Amino acid sequence: MTSPPPIPPEPKFGGFTRFEIELEFVQSLASPTYLNHLASQKYLEEPAFVAYLKYLQYWTQPPYLKYLMYPGPTLKHLELLQQERFRREIIDPGVMMALMTEGSKAAMEWPGS
């Protein structure tokens, strides 16, 4: 009896797996200033990028949630990015500052803070 062929390792891109790259990117969405940067560079207007943001919603599922360092703001911003109106408005520094203030307030109100 022969043993099954070994499972090939996950390909790496620049030394990182796709999982690692997507984890780092999705966590960066917790930053309102990064969202503003994406808008200023017109990424949020690109249909392919918007489709990628939709694809990243798999991070909302339990097997993946445990890997997120800041699940609250990460998932909230990922959800907001699904809305065309938010993608247009995040370029406004006032909207960015409101998100930053909201995040700071939530952190200060967190039990044990």
Image (cartoon, rainbow, N blue to C red):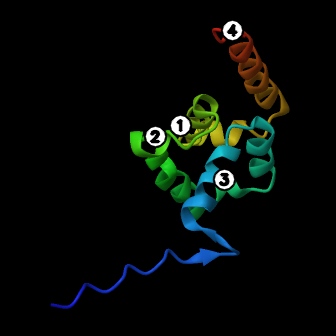
From the image, which quarter does the N terminus lie in?
A: bottom left
Q: CA distance from mark 3 to mark 1?
A: 17 Å
| Left-right relation of 112 to 10 | right
Looking at marks 4 and 1 on the same chain, the residue that comes earlier in the sequence is marked by 1
Looking at marks 2 and 1 on the same chain, the residue that comes earlier in the sequence is marked by 2
* Above or below for 4 versus 24: below
The reply to whether callout 2 and callout 1 are in contact (CB within 8 Å) is yes
* Residue type at tag 1: Glu
Q: Which residue is mark 2?
A: 60
* Above or below for 96 versus 60: above
* Residue type at tag 3: Glu
Q: 91 or 78: nearer the eye?
A: 78
Q: Which residue is mark 3?
A: 24
* Residue type at tag 4: Glu
Secondary structure beneath label 4: helix
Q: Which residue is mark 1?
A: 79
Q: CA distance from mark 3 to mark 4?
A: 26 Å
The reply to whether callout 3 and callout 1 are in contact (CB within 8 Å) is no
User: Residue drawn 63% across and 38% down?
Assistant: 69
Looking at marks 3 and 4 on the same chain, the residue that comes earlier in the sequence is marked by 3
Camera-nearest label, 2 or 1: 2
Residue closest to the far right: 93
